[in-house]
Every structure is written in structure tokens, then in C-alpha cells.
Amino acid sequence: MPASDPVPEQLAPVLEWLASEPADDPRAELNALRGHLGGLPEAAVGQCIDEFEARVLDVCGRLKPRLLNAALPLSHELHAVAGELVEALLEVAGKLGEMAAATRERWRPARRGDALAMTGRALSLVHEAFVVAAMGGGVTPPGLWLAAYGIVAAGGGFGALVSARPETAAADALHALKRLLALAVLQPESLTARELVWANDYLEGVADEGALSTESLQPAASSFWIDPGEDLPPIATIRSAAPAAEGLVYFSAFAVSRALSGQLDWLKERMAEAETVGLELDGELLEPDASGLPVGLTPVEMVSLLQRMRDRWALPPNRGQSRRAYRYSVQVCVGLRAVWEAARSDGATERISEWMVYNESPGGYALMSVEGVTGSLSAGMAVALRRDAGHPWAVCIVRWIRSDSPGQVELGLQVVAQTCTPVTIGFRGAEVSSTTHALILPPLPALRRNQAILAPAGTYASRRFVLVHEGERLYVAQARVLSLDMQTANVELFQYEVDPYPI
């Protein structure tokens, strides 16, 4: 028997394991999978790679619902198994990439389609690894982008994908790559796990609208450049001009943002119609056949997310203010309700913890946890910080969150006010006839000219609302919304004025 042929004694235990039921414990399943895959002779991989792919995707399907409902930072156990799943996905993807390269070299051009089919499957596994890492709050694993670009090269290079004809193996591989790139440039660290999964599902149907080219794309402000020799994601041209180097690839999701705009307008019209005729917002309105949108978010959450997706694909954000490195401790209060209570009681709350600022700009901060994290953290939530009890609370929104290890969290914050006033508000026409805790934010130069309200997501229900402030004297007024400036999965911010013609 030639040395390159699979040895039955080596392959038999692997085939026996693959034929068995997956272990209930994902960590045990992943340890067994990686052990068997790593011990296989190269010539034997092709005989059972399909089964390995199915096994790792089975673990992925079981773990993602747990990540969807988990609070950040993850527990030690969940963090560990998520990391092992990412590594297993990349390992199986790497084997598929190697098989694609071998098939292409050995059978060129007779089995070029087979090589590209393996390329598409491998890219889909890299994509799953990216999603799992992002859902867990971690940074992109080192080597992931080089793995993706290497798989493309093994399948024939970017040129083979760019020129792909519809309904071919190359087109499937191109779809998988575009979906990965479009998700990456959305800045997943700024999305909650629910938003990330919804955006990923949404891209399944629209990723092909994205553009991938070996030539620069227009509009330049919406494009990204890729250096396949570097372990880096697509880089926005508006933030860093493409270098004068050979082999660069360009990506743009501008056309995706244009397609999205039509669905966003349709959804807004349907929501307005639902309010008029009494249609259930999360019932008939969101029938998949009618909306063409994934399930998993409420209509209000969809509108908020779709607007952010459209903006980031059409014009990637460009930092207007440089950040400077600092290192000092601050008191932090996490969550709108906790901030409301702290502002109302002059900071007399148990929900204050110590964090470390490691850089800042006039418009924001980057923080690192010092004494561990209690409670739940997510992108888009309200946070307040101050130097000490002698300073007012600066109110911020979490722009991004990273958690590379249990108990260790980094937050990127956008300042929306340097002080706040706790109030309660109630909207006319709201589904629930009750008041809601909220914060009055004073005008902030360069951001807004009027006072604003920061309230829980879904509070805004009509133009007019009642505002109640319980201070030394009880203050009650009718106010009206001037503009809705921000919506996240957790909060919304709108400018207002006291209504000169109360009803």
C-alpha cells in the first residue's frame, strides 16, 4: 500500500466516532473533533471531511442560541467553549481549503467547479467562526482574515470569484465572501448579539448586491480596500487611503445600502399604517411573506438597526477627533435605570463600580474594567461616569464592547451629555398607560441645540408627552418631540421643547 494511502487502522476509530451520536457537552465534542481531525493522515481527510463539517456545524447550531441569550462578559465555561468552537471551525475550513488547492492543481481544469465548491464551504465556516467570536464579544481571532484570503487563493484567487457567473460554484463562494465582508464592515462590536444575528440573516438575501473588484470602486467614500497578504479586515478608504501596492482587492456595500433603503421605507410606512388601523406590530406586520425581513427583532428594533446598517454601508464612520492615551480611574454606573437612580440620589447607589480610562477624546472614552463586572453589558446601553463624587455624571452611550476574557471588558463610549436630570415621562397613545424613567440632557454644542430626553428603547410613541420632575417642587409639563436623534437596542434619544399649546 503506498505511503500516501489512508491506513485502515488509523481511519477506523475516526469513522467509528463520526458514526456515533454527538456528545451532549459541546466542549467534549469539540475536543474529540479536533483530536481526530489533527491525527488524520492527509490522504484520509477527503474521505470524511463532510462528516467533520457536519459535526462542527452541529455544535455551532447548539451554541449560538446560548450566546444569543448570554450576558457579557461571558461565563468562564461559555467563553472557553466559544473559543474552542471558533478554532475548530477554522481548522475544518483550513482542511477544505487545502483540499480545494489540491483538487485544482491535480485536475485542472476538469474539476475546477469542485475546487470552488470546497472554497465556498470553507469560506462559510470562516464566516461562522467570525459570527461566533463577535457574539461572544471577542475580537476577531488572529489568523482569521489570512485564513479567508488563503482559502480564496486556494480556490483560484479573487479574480476567479470576481468573474463568477450566476448559479455556479464560484458564485456561491463569492456570496459567502461578500456576506463575511459586509458583516465585518458593520462593526459587529457595536451590535448586540440579537442585532448581529439578525443582520447576518438579512445578509443571506442581499449580500450579492455588494461589489468585489480588483480595481478601485466608486463612490470611494463607501469603499474598502483589502490586502490579502495581511491579517486585517477590509479597511475603509475614507479612514485610510489604499497603499500603492499590487494585489489589493476592493469591496463596497453601497448597493446593499440602497436596496436596504427601500425595505426600510416600506417598514416605516407599514408601522404608520399599523398605528392607524390597529394592526399588531409584531403580528401581521412581520409575516415573512409580506416583509421579506428576518424574524427576531421588533419593528422598532428593526428600524433602528436598518438605519445604522444603511448608514455604515453607505458612508463608513470616520473619526473626526483624535484620541489621546490617558490612564486614570473613574466611577461608572451602567444602565439607564441605574444612572437615573444615581442622579436622583446624588450617587447613593450600590451599582457604582471602578473602571480605568485608557484613552479619551472630546467626544468619548475607552474604558477597561478594574474590579470585575457585575450585571449585563451590551452595545447601545446608557452608561454614566465621573472622576469622583465631587463631579457630575457624564452620560454616555456604549458604542462598542469587547470582552476577550471572562471578567475583562473594554467599552467605547460616546458622550451625549455632561450632566443630567432624572424625570419620568408618559406618551400619549402609548400601548402601556404608565410613566417611564428618563433623563433630561442639556443642549450640547455640535450635537444638538435643544434639550433632549434619553429614555428606554420603544418609549417614543407620539409627538406629545407628559414630563414630571420631582425636585424641591413638583414640576409637570406637556412637551413635544422635535426630532428623534438616536435609537439603539437599549435606548433612544430625542430633542424636545415644552409645548406652547398644551392640549
Image (tube, rainbow, N blue to C red):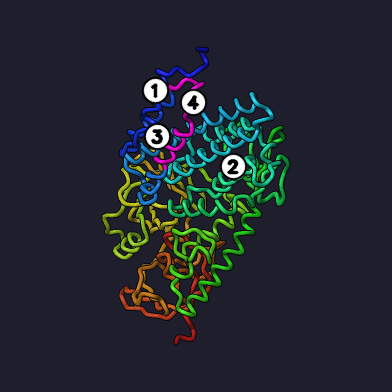
Q: CA distance from mark 2 to mark 1?
A: 35 Å
Quadrant position of residue 161: top right
Of badges 4 and 3, nearer the viewer stands: 4
Q: Are marks 4 and 3 in contact (CB under 8 Å)?
A: no
- Secondary element at tag 4: helix
Which amino acid lies under the numbered mark 1 shown in the image of this protein? Answer: Ala
Instruction: Give the residue drawn at x 36%, y 75%.
Output: 432
Circle number at residue 177: 2
Q: CA distance from mark 3 to mark 2?
A: 23 Å
Which amino acid lies under the numbered mark 3 shown in the image of this protein? Answer: Glu
Vertical placement of residue 229 versus 161, above or below: above
Vertical placement of residue 455 versus 351, above or below: below
Counting residues from the start of the chain, the first of labels 1 and 4 encountered is: 1
**Residue range of the region highlighted in magenta in the rendering:** 39-60
Instruction: Give the residue drawn at x 43%, y 46%.
Output: 135
Q: Is residue 171 left or right of residue 215?
A: left
Counting residues from the start of the chain, the first of labels 2 and 4 encountered is: 4
Counting residues from the start of the chain, the first of labels 4 and 3 encountered is: 4
Give the x, y percent position of residue 77. 31, 39
Nearest to the observer: residue 309 or residue 396: 309
Give the x, y percent position of residue 27. 34, 35
Q: How many marks?
A: 4
The residue tagged 1 is 12
Which amino acid lies under the numbered mark 2 shown in the image of this protein? Answer: Leu
